[in-house]
Image: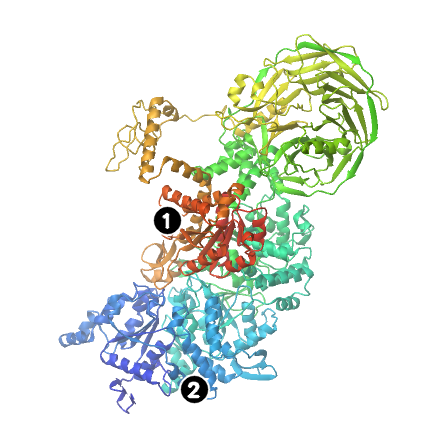
Amino acid sequence: MSKLGLHLGKVTVRIGDSSHVVRPPKHPELVPVGYLPARLPRSVLEHLRWMLQKDALGQDIFLLGPPGPRRRVFALQYLELTKQEVEYVALSRDTTDTDLKQRREITSSSAHYIDQSAVKAAIEGRVLLLDGIEKAERNVLPVLNNLLENREMQLEDGRFLVHPVRYDKLLLEHSKDELSSWNLVRVADNFRVIALGLPVPPYRGNPLDPPLRSRFQVRNIEPMSFQEQFTLLKEQHDKIAVDKLSRILSVAHTLMTEESKTLGFPDFPVESLSDMAYILAKVPQVSMNKLISWLYPYQAFLNNKGCRSVEHVLKNLHVDSDSHLEFESVQHESNNQKYLAVLRDGNETIKFEVDGGKRTHLSTMKPFVSTSYHKSLLAEMLQCHLVRDLCIIGPKGSGKSALAGYFAKLLGYQMELMMVYQDMSARDLLQQRVTLENGDTSWRPSPLVMAALKGKLVVLDGLHRAHPSTLSTLHSLTQNREVQLYDGTRLLHHDRFDQLKKENGFSNENLADRNIFRIHPSFRILALAEPPKVGGSFEQWLNSESLTMFLFHQMRALTMAEEKEVIEILVGATSLHMHDILKFVENLRASEDPMVQSLALSLSTRQLLRIARRFRYFPQQSCREAIDKACMTRFLPPLAKNALERSLRDAGIEKSSEQLQKNATECYVKDGIVYIGNTSTPVHQAGSGKVKVPDILFFENDQHISILEAMLQDFTLGEHLLLVGNQGVGKNKIVDRFLQLLNRPREYLQLHRDTSVQTLTLQPSVKDGRIVYQDSPLVRAVQQGHILVVDEADKAPTHVTCILKALVESGEMLLSDGRRIVHPGDTENLNDSAVIQMHPEFRMIVLANRPGFPFLGNDFFGALGDIFSCHAIDNPTVQSEMTMLRQYGPNVPQNILEKLVAAFGELRQLADQNLLNYPYSTREIVNIVKHIESYPEDGVAQVIRNVFDFDSYATETKKLLFSVLHKHGIPVGARILDVNLGRKMQLPQPVYSYKWIPSFLKNPYVQKRPLNINNLAKCTRKNFMVEKHDPRGTVFTEQLMSWKLPLEDMSIITDVVVTNGVDGEKANKIHIMSACPSYLFSLSPSEEMASVLDLHSILPTTWGFDRLRFQLLPLSEQWRDWLVVHEGLTNTMLLVCPSSGKVSQIKTGAGLMEATVNFASSWSRGTQKQQTRIAFGGNGSTVVTYQSSGTKIDIMELDSKFTWTVELPFKVHSVHAINKNAFLLSSQEKNRYLLEYQVVDQWTLQKLVESSLSGYPGQIDGIIGGNQLFKPLSDNPESQHVLATSQDFAGVALGLLDQKDLIQIHTYPREIGEVNNTGDSRVWSLSSGEQLIRIRQPELVPLSVKEEGGEGLFLEVVDLAKKTVSFIPVFQVEGSAQRRKIFPYDILASAGSEDFVTVDQRGNVKMWELAPSKLEKSLYHWKKLVGTEEGRDLQITVEQESGKSVSAPKHGRIDPSGAPHVGGNTWAGGTGGRDTAGLGGKGGPYRLDAGHDVYQVPDWEKNNVPIEVKKAAREMAEKAFKERLNEIKMSNFDAQLYQQISGPIQRQVQSMRVILDSVQAKGKERQWIRHQTSGELDDSKLVESLTGERSIYKRRGEQEPELGSPLELPKRLRLVVDVSGSMYRFNGYDRRLDRQLESVLMMMEAFEGYQHKFQYDIVGHSGEDSNIPFVPVGKYPANDKERLDILKMLHAHSQFCMSGDNTLQATQDAINAIAKTAADEHFVVVLSDANLERYGIPPRAFANVMTSDPQVNVYAVFIGSLGDQAHRLSRQLPPGRAFLCMNTSELPQILQQIFMCSMLTN
């Protein structure tokens, strides 16, 4: 047994065989006291003995061990034992060489060097205790190397420290004065260094520099053994039950084993078990489980697997959790600072005494509602308050700050609030360097130090943000209640201070003179922190070191019942809306989906209280509005938004109609009251601040006024506001207008990435040799009660802006100059010049850009959103934006504004989908309109380049932008000569061709019957978005606009009609009928939404859809909203109202209707029967039906509801209405008849005997009346009718209804003979009736026109007024060499009042502008859009001809020097030359970029290259291409195949690469590196700059990761593809396998070059295997050939594999595989065809697999579906985890949503 010997007189300390002679200390106050216990365990004695040995040998000591106070306590015990003085230095990343050697201080205007700890210890013979060696930067500690090795050091003041032996030798030869004159100073013999450090690795920090390490002797200080600690604790607390003590120690030491460390568990703070023993002795009823959780809050920092492991240990060791103590009261019965805490355990009362404050500063405390949960938490805090500092861990908004304030109030504490931020230094925590009024430098204690002296409660808010190195400076304070400050001041634990006084006879004044002060026994630190992030490569703040500093309490979010209780007490009774929201929030928090849980964080208790207050004062707000505001729904990533929408639907919270359609509001000021909408408030009296009230030009619109009203409502409730939106949406304008209306002065503060906490509050400067601080706008606004507008808040780091939390929430803030902002109600310290009382009218309005892509700013909303009332500022709606733009450009044409608004609206949608990097805002469109308003002659196509020329060099982006602009008719890039109208020709002169001589026949038999109209069921009507394209964006043609209908594969377009717009409508309606299935589409040129009526269940369903033909007939008058839908095969006739979906059936009960069954049955037997046809009756309410080759016609009057059935003496071929009472009939024998209604129910029939003069009319396709074209022949326009015949361009019948004996027919003959037109033979006319429009095949088109227009169909437009005919290409056949047959009805058409519409079988709807007057006007406006340069000064440009001719293409010589070459034809890689491979030249074989500037040969000179040279160059390029293919063993066929797959996805690849760039761009941002000798002056080191120190600069650089910190790991992605047989089998149905191949190729191409950030592999599954490797990790395809081979393997496996499905097993295998790899994040993306039902796999089983490991983000992308299979399956999977991707172009957005959503959940 080692022995400790103490002898009187000469004092010698002996431990075993080691001894040390104790010297009387010169400064006993520097000798540690109170660390030596009455009995030391053997292990401690062994360590002390070793230290005695090293001391005797004159060797410096390094105590190494795990985190905790044990190493420090050993060192202090040894120094107390040997009575040695100590100089203590707590090292951190902020420690510099001046903190160790000498620091300059200014006194009496002169700079003096002050010795620091290392120098003082060396000279005075003290022990230098360096704590936290691993925290110091590597370039700091080497300054001590020479001092440690040789006991020598050169000081900054010129002195030189000399080894004592060397000094004594010199003293033999020289006098002491002489040595002093040489600035030599002797190092004391007993100078020693004790260093304390952690082993690096495994702990975080800098490893020892080898030269420094070699100068120490090391001792590993391990934790006490179980038995030793058990014995010690039992001796200290003999009343504790042995079994309880044993079990607690067993848990602690179990969690300290190597097995626990391999699982990633932080060290258990075993040295804090003495505190737990003390609590257990005081409160025996406390649960052992609680004791463990206070020390080791494992649920906060371990994942589910780790928590289960800990709970397994607790269960095996029988650690109970039954006790439930609840706070009852705190009693203060005396004048001291002791309080009696009263707890209750059931019926038992527990009382114990705790420290507290002086019961002052309590008037400003906010009310606090203590629920039963809070009472339990307060009971726990009071128990821990007995022994240690506390830390509350809880999500933001859960009430941590409120609980801390209530805790302080209970114990009478004056609370000091300190916001912790990331770049906070150790000096900010303890002492700051300042200058006095006379310029002398000094040190100002921090609020924490002052609180320690005065016994206050310090609240460190945001402990999770602090750097671990900064927190390490508090280790000695929290663990030993002792700290040494930078000016040498020491604060001691009150017991040790009292012992020091007693042992040495000191008074308080004596110790104060020696800068030693007593820490008040009531002083406590209460830290507030958010839970650490579990998993990933980030460093957890809650680690082995921080666990030794505090006792921890986890605070959860309140339950629905608890929150309701809080709200009802603080706000009032909860409304029904509030109850629904509480229930909704409870469901969000109960979800197991991390994404849904992350949404719940936005609806914290703090936010719910704000919502409840709004409901109380503004009950008109809806639940949905409140939730959207709190969650900032508009700017959520798509996945998170979808999950929220789904949760809202499940909760029955939908957008109300009032929310969807808000009435326009107005704002104004009247009689000193400002009115915004339905909200009002008095106008502020600004007084002298009037000059700071914004005065702006603001054009109001409904959307902005609604936002202003919502802001005013929150403002009147005392809220601070946060406005979030894209750039340029008007955030600043809205705020300025808001303050202008309220007459509120504004202080403006713009943040940026270099904003620091100091610059946010004060701006330091040097004046007359001292540091002075200028108040920032923030401080001025607080003092004067102005509105502080903080702009660009997302640009500043969130660890800087987080200090605003205290200002907003509690009205307190500590400034850099030591002053403090206090709450308006704090009246205690008003006379203190260091206190600034906040003005009661102070408010803050913060502006920030939306979080995430593409801004990549800091997520201000995510960090601080719940302390503000948030408002999403979006681009105005179409109507609001039009209103605003009209005010900016009152003279800008309406159509230009509409085009701009529509184009920018689509660009914003593309930006939201991340197809564009830049979100185009209202600011850009306003600037365009302003330009056009001022310079109307500038074309829009030119002006718009002011915005889009930024993207001129981004090829893919430019293509996308141009496509959008062209789609909306903005002709960017077009020239004024780009006009391509149809070929116009002169009509031949009219010829009197033949005549008709009327001959009356016997009146036909007519039968009149009632017409029955039966109402049927209402049809399903669905709205859908239809994209409108304006073809005039590139070239001006007759085509006005086009649409694409969403047709099914087998659909056939059967008819189209245009109904004319009525009064109040802007445009006509287009109605299109399809068969298979029977759908009626309706769309309007002026609307974005179209509708479709499903008539499939009403109209007949028959086989042989190629014969099924529906006809549409528009009606007028009272039937204006209705259409006739007629099916000719079954003669079914319906009346359909497209707008309402109402359907009625027309039945006559006779005539042709009787033949319905016969037609259907005869057709089913194969008998060829003609279909029944309908014709327009001439007045809009008459319908004629007839059967070709039949002898009857039915004339139905819808108004009077009767039918005439007319029996005719011939077989009918066609019927054409002349008017409502007259019809022109053609027989099968090509005879003409005139059927007229004469008297009641009497019809007459005349045969028109034809007499040819110079031609034959042929087939009559139509007749149009009321045209006065031949005035000399007839003055009555009613007697003139235009005939459309197959033989002529047109014909005119004169005297048709004049009851004359002669009807003249004048025609415009064709040169081409009659050709059977197999297309639509109908003819149309616009409202003027002077144009005949019909569809013509190429055979009826002149050869010259056909050569220009190509092989296809044409519109033939005959203008009888201008005597012209135009041919307009309308439908082109793909492949002129292999022209396919044009089937009947490939093109269907209809005419409205002014426009003409065609539709083809692909669903392409086109509207044509054919009226000459309108066309001329449109061309004029189009040219205005393009812009013209006529009459302007032109810039002279000279393009110099090279003067050199080309010879033959060649590669060229390679210049080894790499020099640039311009012109010539020698060198490869040159520019502006000829013949050789290069850039910008002519005649070369192919492009070759050598990296030099490009000199461009003019295009016209390139075009002049001879054909044979071009051909040779092309052949040479093809040869080089084939050689490249041969290098990668790729055939021409393979190259074409690869291009076929790759070509369509290049835009998606580019989009995906943009997304990948954005994910990693944030990590490349450089950081400030401090303590530099050059760079920018660091404002925090202005005092040091005055004293002449060198390391006072900072510079930007890439911050190297701290050694010991987790490595930056890549994201890990596994793509699981479906290569089962069903993919191949159903590929022809929906191209699912093709889409999968495109998706795989897109991923391989997009991820190329990003493998350092994203590691991926691709595996497949089929019925044969669940894990088929295609692309292993790290073996990525290097070229097109390798990528194509992978695609071929995918295709082949799907073709030849056995049937079956392994989706579940493949997903599980993928999860298990990548979970084992170290990565920043883990993703599994499963591509599937949703064909699980076929194999009996329930969706729930798939959902369970997807959520089996919370560390792996699993998503399913369904790329194929039979019917709605994929849709149904996705709805049964976890929200946000399943996607439908029926178009490969959607995949980049899906992957981007996955990445963004993962960032949200983290």
Q: Tell whether label 2 touches label 1 (CB within 8 Å).
A: no
Q: Label 1: which residue?
A: 1676
* Residue position for label 2: 234
In terms of depth relative to the viewer, which is nearer, 507 or 332?
332
Residue 571 in the image: above or below residue 270: above
Sequence-first disc among 1 and 2: 2
Please state the horizontal and vertical placement of residue 677, each as a whole percent of the image.
67, 50
Residue 1782 vs residue 690, the one in the foreground: 1782
x, y percent for residue 1542: 43, 40
SS at circle 2: helix
Determine the residue positioned at 25% across, 85% down: 19
In the rendered view, does 1546 fall on the left or right side of 1278? Answer: left
Is there any visible trace of residue 745 in the rendered image? no
Percent x, y of residue 533? 46, 63
In the image, farthest residue toward the top: 1253
Is residue 605 visible in this depiction of the protein?
yes
The residue lying furthest to the right in this view is 1240
Image coordinates for residue 897, horizontal then vertical, percent: 59, 36
Which residue is rendered at x = 58% and y = 21% of the image?
Answer: 1367
Q: Look at label 1 and name its amino acid.
A: Tyr
Q: Crowding near pointer 2: few (<14 within 10 Å), some, many (20+)?
A: some
Give the alpha-carbon distance from disc 1 to disc 2, as whole Å: 63 Å
Q: Is residue 1315 left or right of residue 533?
A: right
Kind of residue indicated by mark 2:
Lys
From what the image shows, is residue 517 above or below residue 1454?
below
* Local SS, label 1: loop
How many marks the image carries: the answer is: 2
> Is label 1 or label 2 in front?
1
Q: Going by the picture, which residue comes out furthest to the front?
A: 1165
Give the quarter of the figure containing the N terminus: bottom left
Res. 1213 mark: none
